[in-house]
Amino acid sequence: MLKKFIEQIQQMAIASPAAERCGVIVDGEVIEFRNQDESPETNFIISARDLVGLHSNDFTIWHTHTPQGFHELTPADVAIAKFIKRPVLMVRGDGAWDLYDPLITKPYLGRTWRTYHRNCYSLMQDWYKQEWGVVLPDFYPNTPDEFTTISPSLFLKNLELYGFRQVAEPEKVGDVILTNEAHAQGWHCSIVTKTTPMIVCLSQWIQRP
């Protein structure tokens, strides 16, 4: 069924390469709403009135990206999904697509990389939430380039605000290991999940709650 929806939305993207189109998938049907954003070539806005008017709360928001748009969901897309607690689907005319459902947590192993919702930090967020009930904010860059142009990372800059502190070495389950490369300090992270950890990235910066 998802493949059918993607193909249908892809045709809309092909027909409108200069602007994003948007709507919802509900009751097995793709419904289009007017994009109310002032810059439809790069963004989309669905009116709250359109969403309130739906006769079902079980819906997926969809939108297209132009050929110049990102080939995955953006940080804003992920934020929208989390705010309304509904899935968001993006489709481009070239067939690239990305889907994020904030109500589903993927298994820790075997995830397909997605820049803004299936990365090392989102894995850390999921682990802390599922294992300890700790909710960590989204510290994601606005563009993939910021992984290498902004250092230290947003998380590293704010870690003390969320109860983390530096330790000399991994001491217990839940300790976090961050990269210490000058051009990407703190952007890559891993978690100690056993008392004798297998460390997957070397770092001098180690924090724990």
Image (tube, grey):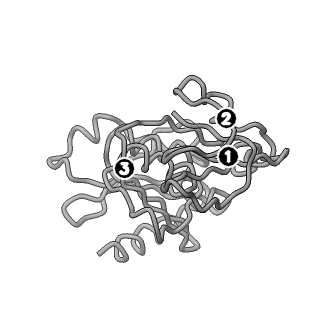
CA gap, disc 3 and disc 2: 24 Å
Question: Tag 2's secondary structure?
Answer: helix
Camera-nearest residue between 129 and 169: 169
Q: Do we see residue 77 in this rendering?
A: no
Question: Alpha carbon of mark 2 to alpha carbon of mark 1: how far?
Answer: 8 Å
Amino acid type, residue under disc 1 in the picture: Leu
Q: Which comes sooner in the sequence, label 2 or label 1?
A: 2
Left or right of residue 32, residue 122 in this image: right
Which residue is labeled 2 in the image? 156
Residue 148 position within the rendered picture, expressed as x and y whole percent measured from the top left: 79, 48
From the top left corner, tell me how far across and down residue 59 is, in percent. Answer: 26, 53
Q: Quadrant of the N terminus?
A: bottom left
Type of residue at label 2?
Answer: Leu
The mark nearer the N terminus, 3 or 2, is: 3
The residue located at (35%, 55%) in the rendering is 32
Crowding around mark 1 (Cα neighbors within 10 Å: few <14, some 14 to 19, many 20+) is many
Q: Quadrant of residue 101?
A: bottom left
Confirm or deny contact between disc 3 and disc 2 (CB under 8 A). no
Q: Report whether residue 41 is seen.
A: yes
Q: Are marks 2 and 1 in contact (CB under 8 Å)?
A: yes
Q: Which residue is painted at 51% across and 49% down in the image?
A: 124
Instruction: Tell me the distance, in whole angstroms, between the alpha carbons under discs 3 and 1.
Output: 25 Å
Q: Position of residue 118 (x, y in %)?
A: 51, 58
Q: Secondary structure at mark 1?
A: strand
Give the residue pinned by disc 1: 178
Do the CB atoms of the residues marked 3 and 1 lie less than 8 Å apart? no
Mark nearer the viewer, 2 or 1: 1
Q: On the image, which quarter does residue 161 sit in?
A: top right
